[in-house]
């Protein structure tokens, strides 16, 4: 099954087979403003649900870096956001789901069912999610009260990010991986809570639940290969670092804080026709040293990543293939270039030797062995999955490449 195609790898591709386009299954069946329960089809996008639910004062507790993701995809990848340390991943907020299994039956699953948790994070390999009931949170406004801190180097950034998490609903940092020397890893630590009505200025208080998410421009398909290099990467990093000086209590809308890339349509074209590889991993909290080691290895190899995001995860999900676990997660966008494959193999070794793993929704080139090492509950998941689909009806390029299914 394929939703809006925002995975960076091949989980929604099936060479030589059938792919189901789920975007036509897009009804919102009910919204209960009192309980916060919503019933939606699997093809409904997070963007559509947010636009419909916010007028009732309801908020999706887990939002990734883009709203252009379907509910089915969000469950299948068990997506996470900047609030993971507080609310966990998406599957924690699914009350029930309707799954079409390999025999054509529709099963309603709840968190008491093993197949429910095999489906959460199961990358679409247990069946097709056609409907789900979600638990949303109540909010007074659609805005965030944001504290931003400019921090001079990576060590201080990670140290600062390690304290006061409990005071904030959302936390993330962007950092500069191009500048070397004493300022290596300088960055912006951005932490926020949902704004209360009293915190809004009078102008915004007149329509506090307004969904303010403009798209300002679309990147044309004209960028040449190699445009993002060490020189342009340094210029971008300098501009991004300088644009947000330390400021406490700023009011920001949804797009400003959660989805800055959604402001720019087709932003990926800026990487040129070769595109980029997104490398995301998580390592245990006491192995934060791996973050620096990975960044140094990327820089030493002559590659450039301008969009670098660092978060701290909270408790792991009950789902066997869910990506988050307590620790540091780093996300790098590296332009495709010579030697990148070899570099990523070296990075894999650093991550796996530290007890970490890769995000299957972002992964596009690692090995079955890396998945076996990174996901110790893989055999448990396979047993549940094989019982639901003994003949292997549901498969994908990702499942074959990583030998997830027999």
Image (cartoon, rainbow, N blue to C red):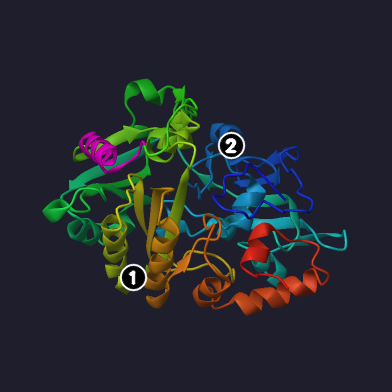
- Residue sitting at 27 percent across and 55 percent down? 299
**Magenta span covers which residues?**
227-243
Kindly tell me whether residue 191 is visible in this rendering: yes
Q: Which residue is mark 2?
A: 53
Q: Which residue is mark 1?
A: 285
406 vs 78, nearest the viewer:
406
Most common SS among magenta residues: helix
Say which element carries label 2.
helix
- Indicate which disc residue 273 carries: none
- 301 magenta-colored: no
**x and y, in percent, of residue 211 in the image:** 50, 29
- Residue sitting at 33 percent across and 45 percent down? 192
User: Which one is closest to the eye, mark 1 or mark 2?
Assistant: 1
**x and y, in percent, of residue 327 in the image:** 37, 67
Q: Residues within 10 Å of mark 1 (few under 14, many from 20)?
A: some
Q: Is residue 104 above or below residue 216?
A: below
- Residue sitting at 34 percent across and 49 percent down? 308
Q: Is residue 365 above or below residue 376?
A: above
**x and y, in percent, of residue 391 in the image:** 83, 70
Q: Residues within 10 Å of mark 2 (few under 14, many from 20)?
A: many
Upstream in sequence: badge 1 or badge 2: 2
């Amino acid at each position: 099954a394929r939703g809006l195609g925002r995975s960076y790898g091949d989980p929604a591709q099936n060479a030589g087979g059938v792919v189901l386009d789920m975007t036509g299954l897009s009804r919102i069946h009910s919204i209960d403003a009192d309980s916060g329960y919503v019933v939606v089809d699997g093809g409904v996008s997070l963007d559509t649900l947010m636009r419909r639910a916010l007028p009732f004062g309801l908020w999706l507790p887990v939002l990734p870096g883009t709203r252009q993701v379907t509910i089915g995809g969000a469950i299948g990848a068990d997506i996470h956001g900047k609030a993971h340390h507080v609310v966990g991943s998406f599957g924690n907020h699914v009350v029930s789901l309707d799954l079409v299994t390999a025999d054509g039956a529709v099963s309603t699953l709840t968190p008491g069912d093993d197949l429910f948790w095999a489906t959460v994070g199961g990358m679409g390999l247990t069946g097709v999610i056609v409907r789900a009931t979600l638990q949303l949170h109540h909010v007074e406004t659609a805005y965030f009260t944001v504290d931003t801190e400019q921090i001079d180097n990576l060590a201080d950034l990670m140290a600062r990010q390690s304290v006061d998490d409990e005071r904030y609903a959302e936390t993330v940092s962007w950092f500069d991986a191009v500048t070397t020397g004493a300022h290596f890893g300088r960055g912006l630590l951005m932490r926020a809570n949902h704004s209360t009505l009293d915190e809004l200025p009078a102008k915004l208080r007149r329509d506090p639940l307004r969904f303010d998410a403009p798209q300002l421009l679309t990147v044309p398909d004209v960028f040449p290969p190699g445009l993002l290099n060490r020189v342009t990467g340094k210029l971008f990093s300098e501009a991004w670092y300088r644009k947000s000086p330390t400021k406490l209590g700023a009011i920001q809308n949804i797009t400003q804080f959660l989805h800055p890339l959604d402001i720019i349509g087709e932003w990926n074209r800026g990487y040129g026709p070769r595109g980029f590889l997104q490398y995301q991993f998580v390592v245990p909290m006491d192995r934060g040293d791996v973050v620096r080691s990975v960044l140094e290895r990327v820089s030493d190899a002559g590659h450039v990543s301008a969009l670098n995001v660092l978060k701290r995860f909270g408790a792991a999900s009950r789902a066997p293939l869910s990506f988050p676990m307590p620790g540091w997660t780093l996300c790098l966008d590296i332009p495709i270039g010579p030697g990148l494959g070899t570099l990523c193999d070296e990075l894999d070794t650093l991550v796996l030797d530290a007890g970490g793993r890769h995000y299957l929704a972002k992964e596009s080139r690692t090995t079955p062995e890396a998945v076996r090492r990174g996901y110790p509950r893989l055999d448990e998941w396979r047993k549940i999955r094989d019982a639901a689909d003994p003949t292997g009806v549901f498969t994908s390029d990702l499942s074959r490449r990583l030998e997830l299914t027999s």
